[in-house]
């Protein structure tokens, strides 16, 4: 649950996991994860052939250029992205490639967009100094990768295991996802993930909505998570765990989160004995180029539900 980048699932797949059920309400996350699974030989051939075609397309003005040129991306890269994203949609709709190959192409597109983005990793803001050098007086003002030509790269494919991947609300997916082990990694602070990654989500959905404000966000009202709201986070976690049908349950959280360790332990207490691991983790604080390192505690809770 709360798939995110899929790092935990990928690590477990590398250790022999035979099946996975994954859920996230952001299409940009599920598309990258689903697109990374190994394809049939014919779909893989189509993927690599299309990758070459897409990288040779001339740029054309379109939705991405209109919305994001000179902000999250350079104008030249926006033109390239418009041409590539439209062609991926056309290939899928026309049946020129299979749904699986189209999803892998979309995954490659989203990863390429993220590499070319004029941000510090999240999209709640963009760096304001396109056209200037990367650093000025020791301050990071532009990621110089934004000046590189937008290019799709081959994917590192995951093993083709049994899988079910849901895009949508975790409460809708959990009842259909009986499993031996559940890994629960909810948002832990007030920053909504749909705000942090709204550009990638917009490009993944490709519905071309109007964008507004300085940060050029689309309407994300249907993507807001109760886990990022102080009054709702506790009841939401309790409800989710109550609905879980799994033997082993792991919950990941953070010492700077909305819920305290004690509040989470209180939610887990009806299920009997549980174990908590504490892992100190160095992170960077806020501020482009002037961040300070600090240490937070990552909590990993474990209990047996059945």
Image (cartoon, rainbow, N blue to C red):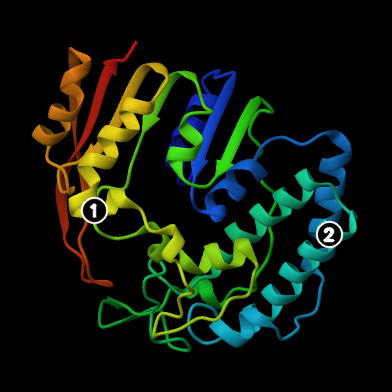
Image height of 164 relative to 131, above or below: above
The residue tagged 2 is 93
Q: Quadrant of the C terminus?
A: top left
Q: Which residue is at the front of the view, 252 or 109?
A: 252
Does 271 sit above or below residue 223?
A: above
Can you give x and y, in whole percent of width and height, for residue 58 in the image?
Answer: 80, 79
Foreground of the two, 91 or 132: 91
Q: Residue 54's x, y, as percent?
A: 79, 65
Q: Position of residue 33 (x, y in %)?
A: 58, 43
Where residue 189 is drawn, which disc sits there? 1
Residue sitting farthest toward the left: 262
Question: Which numbered circle lies on residue 205?
Answer: none
Disc 2: CA contacts within 10 A as few (<14), some (14-19) or many (>=20)? few
The residue at the point 65 percent across, 67 percent down is: 206
Q: Separation of disc 1 and disc 2 at Cα?
A: 39 Å
Position of residue 148 in the picture relative to residue 99 (left or right): left
Residue positioned 54% across, 19% down in the render:
17
């Amino acid at each position: 649950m709360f798939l995110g980048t899929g790092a935990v699932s990928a690590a477990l797949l590398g250790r022999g996991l035979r099946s996975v059920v994954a859920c996230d309400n952001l299409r940009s996350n599920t598309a990258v994860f689903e697109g990374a699974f190994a394809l049939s030989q014919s779909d893989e051939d189509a993927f690599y052939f299309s990758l070459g075609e897409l990288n040779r397309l001339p740029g054309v003005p379109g939705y991405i250029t209109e919305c994001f040129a000179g902000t999250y991306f350079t104008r030249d890269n926006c033109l390239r992205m418009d041409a590539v994203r439209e062609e991926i949609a056309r290939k899928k709709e026309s049946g020129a490639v299979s749904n699986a190959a189209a999803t892998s192409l979309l995954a490659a597109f989203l990863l390429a967009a993220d590499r070319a983005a004029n941000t510090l990793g999240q999209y709640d803001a963009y760096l304001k100094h396109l056209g200037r050098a990367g650093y000025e007086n020791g301050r990071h003002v532009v990621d110089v990768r934004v000046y590189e030509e937008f290019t799709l790269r081959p994917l590192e494919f995951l093993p083709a295991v049994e899988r079910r991947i849901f895009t949508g609300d975790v409460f809708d997916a959990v009842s259909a996802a009986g499993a031996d082990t559940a890994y629960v990694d909810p948002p832990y602070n007030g920053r909504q993930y749909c705000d942090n990654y709204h550009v990638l989500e917009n490009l993944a959905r490709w519905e071309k909505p109007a964008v507004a404000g300085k940060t050029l966000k689309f309407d994300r009202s249907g993507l807001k998570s109760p886990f990022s709201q102080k009054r709702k986070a506790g009841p939401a976690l309790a409800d989710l765990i109550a609905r879980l049908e799994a033997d082993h349950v792991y919950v990941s959280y953070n010492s700077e989160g909305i819920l305290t360790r004690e509040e989470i332990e209180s939610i887990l207490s009806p299920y009997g004995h549980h174990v908590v691991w504490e892992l100190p983790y160095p992170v960077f604080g806020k501020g482009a180029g002037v961040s300070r390192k600090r240490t937070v505690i990552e909590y990993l809770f474990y209990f047996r539900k059945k």
